[in-house]
Amino acid sequence: MVTVPAGERCLPEGFEELEEFVPYWAVAGQDARRYQRSDTTMAEIERFYHAVYPRADAAMDHLEKFPLRDMPGPETRLKRLILSLAQASMSIEIHGEARVANSPWPNEMKIITPEEL
């Protein structure tokens, strides 16, 4: 769960209607975003997708004003929502379900060194 520091805006001004999605979807890292998509219902994915997708162009226009690796907190959370939108779109537009059919879940791959063999 993502938390917002006291006294800080959750999202940039103009994106308040997306704030309800921040705790679950504004997570850091591709693996965390994939896990969130895979561990929720299609109804929740659809609700997130249909709320965020229409705002994606405006969000990108806003985010382009900031350095990618040095964004303020509200912009970082907005960026992470947009990155989660990419995960949600795979479920909506390609798979038709939260996870890829017939894929093991949960799954992960650990890269090991020869010393760990």
Image: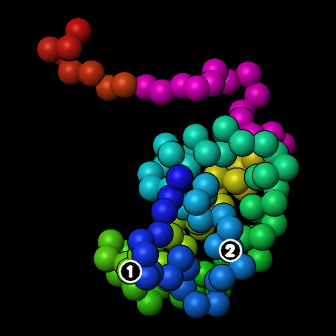
Does the stretch in magenta take in 73?
Answer: no
18 or 92: which is nearer to us?
18
Amino acid type, callout 2: Leu
Few, some or many residues within 10 Å of mark 1 (<14, 14–19, 20+): some
Q: Estimate the x, y position of residue 96 in percent, counting from the top left.
A: 84, 43
- The image's colouring method is rainbow
97 or 44: which is nearer to us?
44
From the viewer's perspective, tell me whether residue 12 is left or right of residue 102: left
In what element is the residue under mark 2? Answer: helix
Main SS class of the magenta portion in the image: loop
Q: CA distance from mark 2 to mark 1?
A: 17 Å
Few, some or many residues within 10 Å of mark 2 (<14, 14–19, 20+): some
Any mark on residue 113, and which?
A: none
The residue positioned farthest toward the top in the image shown: 117
The residue located at (58%, 40%) in the rendering is: 35
Answer yes or no: is residue 104 visible: yes
Q: Estimate the x, y position of residue 86 in percent, counting from the top left.
A: 63, 58
Q: Mark 1 sits on what residue?
A: 72
From the viewer's perspective, tell me whether residue 28 is left or right of residue 81: left
From the viewer's perspective, tell me whether residue 38 is left or right of residue 96: left
The residue located at (68%, 68%) in the rendering is: 20
In what element is the residue under mark 1? Answer: loop
**Residue 58 picture quarter:** bottom right
Q: Which residues are magenta?
A: 93-109
48 or 99: which is nearer to us?
48
Q: Estimate the x, y position of residue 15 in percent, counting from the top left.
A: 64, 83
Any mark on residue 18, and which?
A: 2
Q: Estimate the x, y position of residue 39 in percent, counting from the top left.
A: 67, 38
Q: Earlier in the sequence, mark 2 or mark 1?
A: 2
